[in-house]
Amino acid sequence: MRVAVAGCCHGELDKIYETLALAERRGPGPIDLLLCCGDFQAVRNEADLRCMAVPPKYRHMQTFYRYYSGEKKAPVLTIFIGGNHEASNHLQELPYGGWVAPNIYYLGLAGVVKYRGVRIGGISGIFKSHDYRKGHFECPPYNSATVRSIYHVRSIEVYKLKQLKQPMDIFLSHDWPRSIYHYGNKKQLLKTKSFFRQEVENNTLGSPAASELLEHLKPTYWFSAHLHVKFAALMQHQATDKEQTAKATKFLALDKCLPHRDFLQVLEIDHDSSAPDYLEYDNEWLAILRATNNLINVTARLWNMPENNGLHTRWDYSATEEAMNEVLEKLNHDLKVPCNFSVTTACYDPSKPQTQMQLVHRINPQTTEFCAKLGITDINVSLQKTKEEHHLCGEYEEQEEGESNDSGEDPSECNTDTSALSSVNPDEIMLDEEEEEDDSFVSTHSDMNTPSVEPSSDQASDFSASFSDVRILPGSMFVSSDDTLGSPVGREGSPGEAVESGDGKDLTEVPLKRLSDEHEPEQRKKIKRRNQAIYAAVDDDGAA
């Protein structure tokens, strides 16, 4: 089937679907599925905008609300994960996933589903070590700290995903797995994004949690976004005793949705022709959710996942055949994801702006139904109960601020992170509050730096061709066969003619991009991203 993958969406649904329609007219057939790698921005109204971690001048409604209200419907099944610029209060209603609009499905904090027999998993958010071992304690209205910590990946979600044993076809993350840049054309990456050099050389760019999942799951494809650059890599995994041949993961990161940017890729993915053409729950994943239900934590206290160290009576929560059969019984042997989307709040009305709309911590009926079927706990219900017991939600924020990295507890399982973009990346929004000190946690369990076998140039060539063979998009949107080899991208003679964007501009006309000086002093001032084209705003200093 034909699968389209998008990088950072930034609420530009209309433009993405228009580009897909263009691809369908140029290609061999319709697009069957769209996967979005975060910063989706499912903003329904003005209250949602206030929950998005961007400076106020970048908060714009974009077009999602039209799909939420029913004015428009997504023309293709769309599955997405959360990033670090989201309407966090909306996504928080669906911790286990659900429909944010008809035909648009959110995978949840972490999740696994199937479509036409293709198994698709994902994890939302970005990694920050100081929040990694906390529970999901945030709830609206958020303060200046929790509006950011709400989208930080938690160890419980990684732990659940590491219980999976069955093969994974596709996995989505917003930030890149750490070390993945060593398996592609690192030279070209640093030429395009020279300000990543220090972190790449120090092996601190990216998420160690995602790297751990990559090594465990070994999916056929792994798609990411976040760093606003197209990058392809091939990771050859080491064979285990049970595996007859070593597995390989084809990694692809994509840019943000803008003209002249590599934000979209169309792939041909093998699927089961006998499988249903609707979205299905994954039985193994549901069994793991049931097994780990008692591990739910809604406080900001640091804690460690169970492991085989003599301190826990149970540490293996993987799904047994018996557990998966119990799930099937509970669902009456029907794994179809119900089309049970419902509007839970007032939708934005351009003719009646409501700038003072109240923020409410909502319980979503989709989550209520899902939890009732499986017999698990709705995290939001637990949060509300805890809030009532303590009379105010802010107690947990106070705990968070009081728990520094030297709290005296055991170190995090994952290495220090700088996976929110490089502190000197001029292509990303920098919140003043996010300019934090370096984290200090060190891994005590695994070496993230040497997880797999480095590919040869021949392997890289074969891998890159696996993307370019199916490309039908304009030159600004596909992965070329040069991406992992270091030679210039040849735009002349590419399949198909140039495609114009909605404003009539030729998308293959790639303008020169400003690059940072690779040799600037380490003490350089941090730069804020200039994203006027996305957020329709001009910085106060008027810089480009």
Image: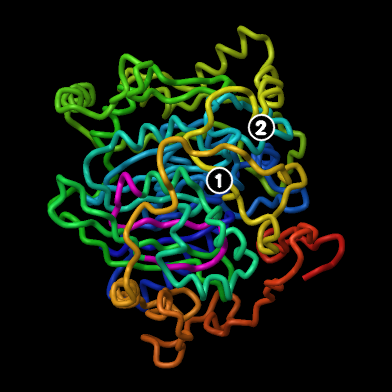
Picture quarter with the N terminus: bottom left
The C terminus - image quarter? bottom right
Secondary structure beneath label 1:
loop
Q: Position of residue 340 (x, y in %)?
A: 38, 34
Q: Vertically, is 417 above or below 377? A: below
Q: Residue at x 27, y 41 (%)?
A: 280
Q: Amino acid at mark 1?
A: Ala
Secondary structure under tag 2 reads helix
Residue 105 seen: no
Nearest to N terminus: mark 1 or mark 2: 1
Neighbours of disc 1 within 10 Å: few (<14), some (14-19), many (20+): many
| Relative to 146, 38 lies left or right | left
Q: Please name whichever residue, 232 or 101, is drawn nearer the observer in this view of the structure.
A: 232
- Residue designated by label 1: 42
Task: Relative to 137, say whether 3 is above or below.
Answer: below
Image coordinates for residue 205, horizontal then vertical, percent: 55, 55
Q: Position of residue 307 (x, y in %)?
A: 36, 25
Q: Residue at x 41, y 61 (%)?
A: 5
Residue labelled with disc 2: 146
Q: Residue at x 71, y 21 (%)?
A: 398
The residue at the far top in this view is 389
Crowding at dot 2, Cα within 10 Å, few <14 / some 14-19 / many 20+, comes out as: many
Q: CA distance from mark 1 to mark 2?
A: 19 Å
What amino acid type is highlighted by mark number 2? Thr
Is residue 207 a member of the stretch shown in magenta? no
Asked where in the image residue 158 lies, by quadrant, the reply is top left
Q: Residue furthest bottom?
A: 493
**Range of the magenta residues?**
215-233
Residue 101: percent from the left, percent from the top? Answer: 46, 43
Give the left or right position of residue 50, taking residue 77 as reference.
right
